[in-house]
Amino acid sequence: MTLNIPRTVFHAHPQIVCDDAAEITVGIPLHFGDPSGEQWAIEAGEGIVDRLDLAAVVVSGPDRQTWLTSLASQNVTGMGPGDSREILILDPNGHIEYAAAALDDGENTWLITARSHAEKLAQWLISMQFMLRVHVCIREDIRLFSTAHKRSREAITDCAGYLMTWEDPWPGVLEGGASYFSGDHPASGLHMMIHVVTQDAAHTFAHEWIAAGQKRRPAGFLAWNAMRVAAWKPDIASEVDERTIPAELDWLRTAVHTKKGCYRGQESVARVLNLGRPPRRCVFLQLDGFRGDLPASGARITFGGRVVGRVTSSARHADMGPIALAVIARNVPADAVLDIDGVAAAQELIVPLDGKSSVSPRERPGANLRNPLLRRPDTPALGGGGVVAASGGQ
């Protein structure tokens, strides 16, 4: 059944500053003639990106925060105006269905997600309303822009149409979170942000923000994506498929509270935390640059003649050259050089092979209860091909 989703008045999306940017069909500027320079500008707090790839699902009503907390992987109860969180909606088996940047304004909780996922997210939320005092709608009277670096926030509140800012907590580990990568994270100090602006003032907002600094400039999606890939930041529209669980992407850092109350998929999250060894793991890939093209999302990755994973995102980084994020089988050797249609790819581990996080127990629960003297030497353990396994469990 298709649900009727309340919407605000829709306004067409004009381009923000330049008319000569390369664009894809939905009108997202890919670049403004200098992708590398645009990336450097973003990283220095001098670049702004028109995020037409994003949309906002807004939940209002007095029960909104406790309701969302009961549905999502993160605790949003108690969020105040301007507070930023990140949430995942999981299926009963712990697979990621939706992801959103959560921002509260005191009366509404904004869920910013990929435009391609907004409609289904809103439909699912409406189906879960029951008798609670909540209201769900898609806000199409706003525009979203991204910047990075704390410097980019200077004078932004004075720009026309500015409403509020979501600050990405990545790669920090929030209260109740857990990390899989334990070294010096490449995204440390990046401060990625999404700014909410009224649609009718979006063009003026962008011009005023750029005019506020001598080096400020518009930047395209290619530059933003290159920075995101280099930061190992998962994206719902790229890194997630029907089998993805949060542990595979190191997304428990910011989007999962491991100690809060029950939510759908919690059992799977807890099991992987306790036992480790998620089925797959996310890796950062440095690609051989001898070819001019980049592997497409979904490109098969092989090792030793067999397919071991797929590319989720690829980009041409201003400093590192061609790079990618990929999801591969957990047991692929950490030092293996992978092959993507003839292109060599060196991996950098994001999730370790044993799948142990910062909050995982050192030893599998119950391991201290094993006692080989309690089993006859000629009797195999259950599941190891013995009588139970051979008889089909009957």
Image: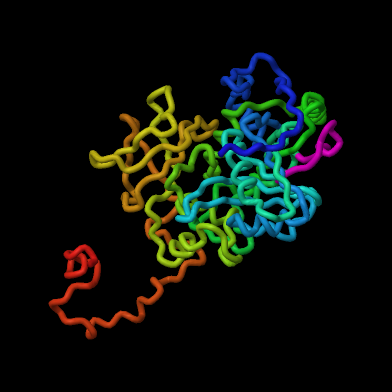
Magenta range is 153-166
Q: Quadrant of the N terminus?
A: top right
**Residue 117 at x, y percent in the picture:** 57, 37
In-front residue for pair 376/20: 376
Left or right of 258, for residue 51:
right
Q: Write the residue at 68% across / 36% down.
A: 146
Q: Which quarter of the rendered picture does the C terminus lie within?
A: bottom left
Judge left or right: residue 8 versus residue 314: right
Q: Is the residue 363 above or below the residue 218 in the image? A: below
Instruction: Note whether residue 315 is visible.
Output: yes
Residue 176 in the image: x percent, y percent? Answer: 60, 64
| Residue ID at (41%, 59%) | 355
Q: Residue furthest top?
A: 20
Residue 154 in the magenta stretch? The answer is yes
Q: Position of residue 10 (x, y in %)?
A: 73, 27
| 57 inside magenta stretch | no
345, 214: nearer the viewer: 345
**Residue extending farthest left:** 378
- Of all residues, the one furthest to the bottom in this rendering is 373
Q: Residue at x 71, y 23 (%)?
A: 13
Quadrant hosting residue 177: bottom right
